[in-house]
Image (tube, helix red, strand yellow):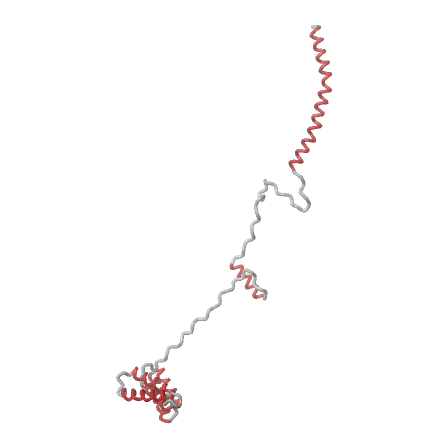
Amino acid sequence: MITKRIVVKNLMRRAMHWMPLLAALTLGLAVFTMPAAAQGSKLADGPPPPEGVAAPASSGSPDAGSTPAPPPSGNSSDNSSDSASDAASGRAPGPGFVPAPANEPEPVTPPAPTWDPLHATKSVEVGTFYLKKGDYDAAIDRFQEAARLQPGLAKPYLLLGEAYEKKGDPGSAVTAYRTYLKLYRTAPDRSRILERITHLESKSKHDAAPPGTG
């Protein structure tokens, strides 16, 4: 029993001897681990960005790594309204201005010839009066009017040939005579008109020839 007490006392003395040393070691470890933990947290945060440079967004942010969406482009109605407002205010049209198509004029259809046999006959009578009177220009106007009011009528062209022949225009007279024969193929005076055409054509060639070649 005495020996056991002595052993216990010796163990307690040794424990009391080592307690200050263990406390000192524990305190020293605590002192060294605290700066290291603080330094590790600073390294995780990274160095501060230089002046004038924005800090990068964190990876957890939903906008990180995405590009901003382009502004919506205006449609044709917005462009037309903008151009209308520009035109009203006198400003120059913007880059998206689309000119409205110009209204093309509708093609003008020439009026159809008026079919009026009654007035055509009257014009032939008046033209014959002017032809006998010697007013060849007035007669020609009336005969041309009769041919326009009643297309296919042969008599105005026969009288036109006579009026041009008396006026001294053999070329127009031949054209009128040939039209008369074309419209009235069974004309009773066909042979006489053909003789007039031959005479007028030879006269036209003689008149057209230079002097001294005849």
- The answer to whether one can see residue 3 in this image is yes
Instruction: Tell me where residue 198 sits by quadrant.
Output: bottom left
Question: Along the horizontal axis of the image, is 119 left or right of 13?
Answer: left
Disc tally is 0
Instruction: Tell me where residue 130 sits by quadrant.
Output: bottom left
Q: Please provide percent x and percent y for residue 188.
A: 26, 87
Q: Please provide percent x and percent y for residue 26.
A: 70, 23
Question: Along the horizontal axis of the image, is 114 left or right of 10?
Answer: left
Residue at the spot x=40%, y=88% of the render? 210
Residue at the spot x=64%, y=36% of the render? 44
Q: Please provide percent x and percent y for residue 96.
A: 54, 60
Question: Along the horizontal axis of the image, is 116 left or right of 83?
Answer: left
Q: Nearer the viewer, residue 103 or 185?
A: 185
Q: Is 16 rendered above or below residue 214?
A: above
- The answer to whether one can see residue 125 in this image is no
Q: Is 71 rendered above or below residue 135?
A: above
- In the rendered image, the quadrant that contains the C terminus is bottom left
Q: Nearer the viewer, residue 185 or 141?
A: 185
Q: Residue furthest front?
A: 212
Q: Is 131 rendered above or below residue 47?
A: below
Q: Nearer the viewer, residue 88 or 202?
A: 202
- In the rendered image, the quadrant that contains the N terminus is top right
